[in-house]
Amino acid sequence: MNYELLNSRRVAVLLSGGVDSSVVVHELCTHGITPDCFYIKIGPEEQEEWDCTSEEDLEMATMVARRYNLSLEVIDCHKEYWEQVTRYTMEKVKAGFTPNPDVMCNRLIKFGAFHEKRGHEYDYIATGHYAQTEIDEQGRKWLVTSPDPVKDQTDFLAQIYDWQLRKAIFPIGHYHKNEVREIAERENLVNAKRKDSQGICFLGKINYNEYLRRYLGEKPGLVIDIETGKKIGMHKGLWFHTIGQRHGLGFGGGPWFAVKKNIKKNILLVSHGYDPKSAYKQTFKVHDMHWLTCEMLADGATQPLDITFKIRHTADHMRAVMQSDGDGVFTIHSEKPIHGVAPGQFCVIYDAQHHRCYGSAEITI
């Protein structure tokens, strides 16, 4: 990171109350940068009903800002979150897809609604993501992976716009998680030992299925064994299940694996046994390809592109060839079969070395 460049620029830090963004503040201040801190409020409507951790988050963020004599402003993006991200999530799951709200939160809220409210006043917006950037010989800015493969968060950033990437900086992206913890403990930061948040960014301790039930209710339907065609039970709504799901199905005689959804008939198709072949795919299609920095494979191109990819937040990535089918559709030919490929998931595309993140597209099957 070029801290000399930042010395003459205005920098905003999105301070969440967690250890990662707190160490971002420490890193900037250590290098002579005096950022303004912002806490984005996106919690649910009824605090008492949803057991949210936002009050504790804000308290932690306030203490960290005070420690470094920095200002902290609360930016209310509640309305934007529930109008944009929640609507996107509910429309997708209702249609039988598997969306990722955190991906859209980065594009629409952290680098979107915040930018409209205050971020436009700053040259750079710093976050605690485990990701890096680099500038090539042509002056183009690329999103690149973190050295910590377990914590790497480039997949969560693969839908942000190019102008958002140009303003984004990730001061802890070159660290491993254990190094960030060590810095926090060495500096006696108040949240040094605080556990990482899990699940959707605003839900805190709330179960994702409760989130879905609140907005979509229940819609019971048949559960069918895909191999035998026999009924094995009833589901409470297809949106409570994801393709490749192995746990929490609640049917006897298992293990069972969710392998397909029949949206029109409201049927969940499952397979018996451990890792059935029907749960794997080696070739699948994507559409609405979002290129981060520049188009790496033109629509209608005849030559394929060697890539690596991932379809979920994991340390594992797969080698593949990406081919254009025309009309905005691409086919991913994976080197190996991959488990749990589901429509609506984001397939995140990287270069062959799994270094630069090219962008992401939605899986269509």
Image: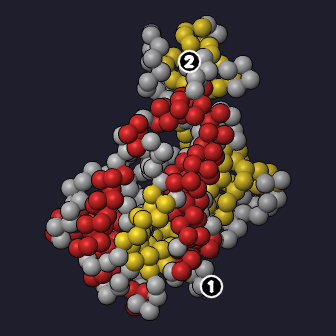
- Three-letter amino acid code at the position of disc 2: His
Helix or strand or loop: what does disc 2 sit on? Answer: strand
Q: Quadrant of residue 130?
A: bottom left
In the image, residue 96 lies at what x, y percent? 65, 32
In the image, residue 210 lies at what x, y percent? 47, 32
Q: Of marks 1 and 2, which one's residue comes earlier in the chain?
A: 1
> As rendered, which of 186 and 71 lies closer to the eye?
71
Q: Give the spatial CA distance, label 1 vs label 2.
A: 54 Å
Q: In screen coordinates, is 38 left or right of 32?
A: right
Q: Is residue 227 visible?
A: no
- Three-letter amino acid code at the position of disc 1: Gln
Above or below residue 93? Residue 114 is: below
Q: Which residue is mark 2?
A: 235
Q: Is residue 119 visible?
A: yes
Helix or strand or loop: what does disc 1 sit on? Answer: loop
In the image, residue 15 lies at what x, y percent? 38, 66
> As rendered, which of 124 and 119 lies closer to the eye?
119
Q: In screen coordinates, is 155 left or right of 159?
A: left
Above or below residue 257? Residue 350 is: below
